Image (cartoon, rainbow, N blue to C red):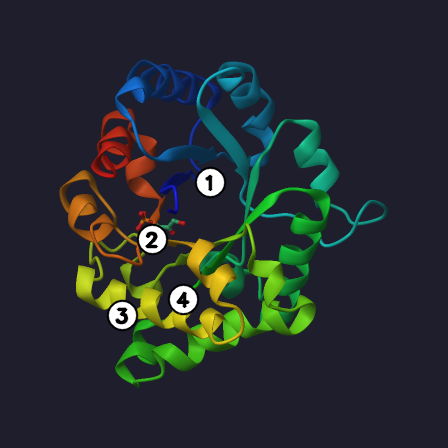
Amino acid sequence: MRQPLVAGNWKMNGSRESIRALLDGLKQGIGQVEVAEVAVCPPFIYIPDVQEQLQGTAIAWGGQDVSTEASGAYTGEISTAMLLDFGCRYVIVGHSERRSYHGESDQLVAKKYAAARAAGLIPILCVGETLEEREGGVTEQVVARQLDAVIDLEGVSALAGGVIAYEPVWAIGTGRTATPEQAQEVHAFIRGRVAQQDSAVAEGLRILYGGSMKPGNAAELLAKPDIDGGLIGGASLQAEDFLGICTAAN
Ligand code: 13P
């Protein structure tokens, strides 16, 4: 049985003040979340504040990105050890915004995934196709290529204990959610592809959906057999909305 995970990706949003209020709201409501594991991924600079406020609660936290390197002359980068130093449990790698705005390749993302795992962080590997790719009928090829980069680097066992987030690029921040059927189809494809190599790893793998997930559509999406949670952008910035998604997993 896979425990659902609902993770908030705050992206580059918030202030010390707004984050305090958001976390107060989450802490008050987290008791209603009976089933899902809950995590938030703030901008790096707010991680110490988040740690201070969430320490000892049921809510975990993580980074939105990480360096492949351990330390040294890498201006602007944050290492796995630094994230661990501030209590992070998760780290997102390969978000489509990093792939497109920062030119991150499948190979670089795979190295980030491997670095995170080696350090003891749980990587959340984002995969997903653009609108053009979906319309061109190559969704499965794109997702397979992004997934295979990780498997090629370290073998399928690298996915044991990891998390994948299927985030169709056309659904991110657009209000245009994938239908539960569209999402389930890709989730089943991902699990099936992993199962071809290792059925136990596939069975335990948590595959989250991300892209305009809201309290109003979460229950339907989460009811699908291969959707094991959500990676939430916009709706994770409001305590009530985020908690609404978390409780939909009940
Ligand atoms: P939205 O929920 O704002 O569509 O963002 C999804 C996302 O990119 C989460 O990583």
Q: Position of residue 15 (x, y in %)?
A: 45, 25
Asked if labels 4 and 2 touch by Cβ distance under 8 angstroms, the answer is no
> Mark 3: is the Cβ under 8 angstroms from ligand 1?
no
Q: Is the shortest distance between ligand 1 and the CB of mark 2 under 8 Å?
A: yes
Q: Amino acid at mark 3?
A: Glu
- Tell me the mark number nearer the camera, choosing from 3 and 2: 3
Instruction: Indicate whether 21 appears above or below 101.
Output: above
Q: Residues within 10 Å of mark 3 (few under 14, many from 20)?
A: some
Tell me the distance, in whole angstroms, between the alpha carbons under discs 2 and 4.
16 Å
Instruction: Evaluate if marks 1 and 4 touch, with contact meaning CB atoms under 8 Å apart.
Output: no
At x 55%, y 19%, the residue is 49
Residue at figure coordinates x 22%, y 62% from the top left:
178
Q: Tell me the kind of residue under disc 2.
A: Gly
Q: Position of residue 150 (x, y in %)?
A: 60, 67
Residue 174 is marked as: none
User: Does label 2 or label 4 sit earlier along the sequence?
Assistant: 4
Which residue is under mark 1? Answer: 12
Q: For the residue marked with disc 1, what is the amino acid?
A: Met
Other residues around mark 4 within 10 Å, as few (<14) / some (14–19) / many (≥20): many
Where does label 4 land, which residue? 191
Q: CA distance from mark 4 to mark 3?
A: 10 Å
Considering the numbered disc 3 on the image, is that residue within a helix, a strand or a loop? helix
Mark 2 or mark 1, earlier in chain: 1
Residue ID for mark 3? 185
Cα gap from disc 3 to disc 1, whole angstroms: 31 Å
Q: Identify which residue is drawn at 46% across, 17% down.
A: 57
At label 4, the amino acid type is Arg
Residue 100 in the image: x percent, y percent? Answer: 49, 65
Q: CA gap, disc 1 to disc 4?
A: 31 Å
Q: In the image shown, does 244 or 94 lie closer to the viewer?
A: 244
